Image (cartoon, helix red, strand yellow):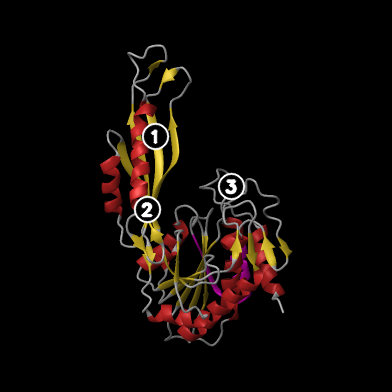
Amino acid sequence: MPDTALAELAAKLVSIDSVNPGLIAGAAGERELALFARDWCEERGLEVELLPPDDRPSVIAVARGSGGGRSLLLNAHLDTVGVVGMDAPHEPRIDGGRLYGRGAYDMKGALAAILDAAARVSGLRGDVIVTAVADEELASIGTEAVLERIRADAAIVVEPTELRQTVAHKGFVGFELETHGVAAHGSRPHLGVDAIARMGPVLVALKALDERVQSGRSHPLVGPGSLHASLIEGGHEFSSYPARCLLTGERRTIPGETVDQVEAELRGIAGEAELRLTVSREPFEAPQTDPFVQLVARLTGESEAVGVSFWADSGLIAAAGIPTVLYGPIGEGAHADVEWVDLASVERVRDVALATAVEWCG
């Protein structure tokens, strides 16, 4: 029989607007959802702490063990992307075993799963730690704050993976390229220098570099890296030569590639453009021989691990020295106009998280 209480919890989480205000100016942010998660966990006897900032808190909820056992971290994010183009994004709807609404798939269904798993824990020696974090969709301030506060012996990040045990994902490096010209009236070409035109050869070189990257080294689980131009702006009016053109782009990296390597690639094609690196995150890969990875593989019944193309907070957790895997529900529509999660798969995530806690922390 379907677990109606778990479905209702997931639907409640979807009903609370938690659009990331770093992505959408003036958006609601994570506070209301964090307070709901805090109260829900406290009512079920978990030890709860809110981490700052106060307007965008993250939640740490601990099912405290009796002592002497290994600890398990269960991680999910509170924030979602925006809702433009969606119909009633925060009015959850269940139809045909699917929960619809913004964040259902990415990743409030999975958040409900790990909250329920932690609430069911009893009689273990080790701690089970749920972290419901802010800002994964942009700068990961929540997981960074969590890792300054706690340690764990292993972690499951419940990003949507279609019930496949995932042990690798890509990283990314953001960059800006800027060309300069000379502003002048459009009727005086002898005085003006077109900064936008100067960006043209750079764009051509970026495309060629992307083709080389995609046809080059490929990782067995996540494939090759890639490169694209994301945004471009320049000029300030129709009848003037533009003095500046700014291009923002992203290089997706695979395990084994470094920020220094990406910087060298970009400097090689930048020409006269100024290059600035912005935010970056390392790719992630967990050794499949790790005992925790093998435990989760056995409990999920997944004989073959996979990789995913997106980045997740698992990269930060693993970089902190915590053995980490990803395992999350089935669904569709992350960042899209129609988003849904399969509720039976949410139950499966809950069951796997609970079984892992029993074996790992017992």
Task: Kindly state the secondary structure of the residue where label 2 is placed.
Answer: helix
Residue type of the residue flagged with mark 2: Gln
Q: Nearer the viewer, mark 2 or mark 3?
A: 2
Q: Nearer the viewer, residue 184 or 18?
A: 184
Query: In the figure, residue 228 lies in which quadrant?
Result: top left
Q: Is residue 35 visible?
A: no
In this view, the residue farthest toward the front is 215
Q: Amino acid at mark 1?
A: Leu
Residue ID at (43%, 61%): 145
With respect to residue 281, does 290 lie above or below? below
Image coords of residue 12 (percent x, y): 68, 63
In this image, 274 relative to 36: left or right?
A: left
- 261 or 11, nearer to the observer: 261
At x 37% / y 55%, what residue is drawn? Answer: 225
Q: Which mark is residue 214?
A: 2
| Quadrant in which the N terminus is drawn | bottom right
Q: Callout 2: few (<14), some (14-19), or many (20+) C-alpha neighbours within 10 Å? A: some
> Circle 1 is placed at which residue position?
246
Range of residues picked out in magenta? 36-51
Distance (Cα) linking label 2 and label 1 = 25 Å
Q: Left or right: 346 with respect to 224?
A: right
Residue density around tag 1, few if under 14, some if 14–19, many if 20 or more, within 10 Å? many
**Does the residue at mark 2 contact the one at mark 1 (Cβ under 8 Å)?**
no
In percent of the image, x 41 and y 11: which residue is there?
A: 187
If you read the primary sequence from the N terminus, does the residue marked by circle 3 or circle 1 appear first? 3
Q: Which mark is residue 115?
A: none
Looking at marks 2 and 3 on the same chain, the residue that comes earlier in the sequence is marked by 3
Question: What residue is disc 3 on?
Answer: 27
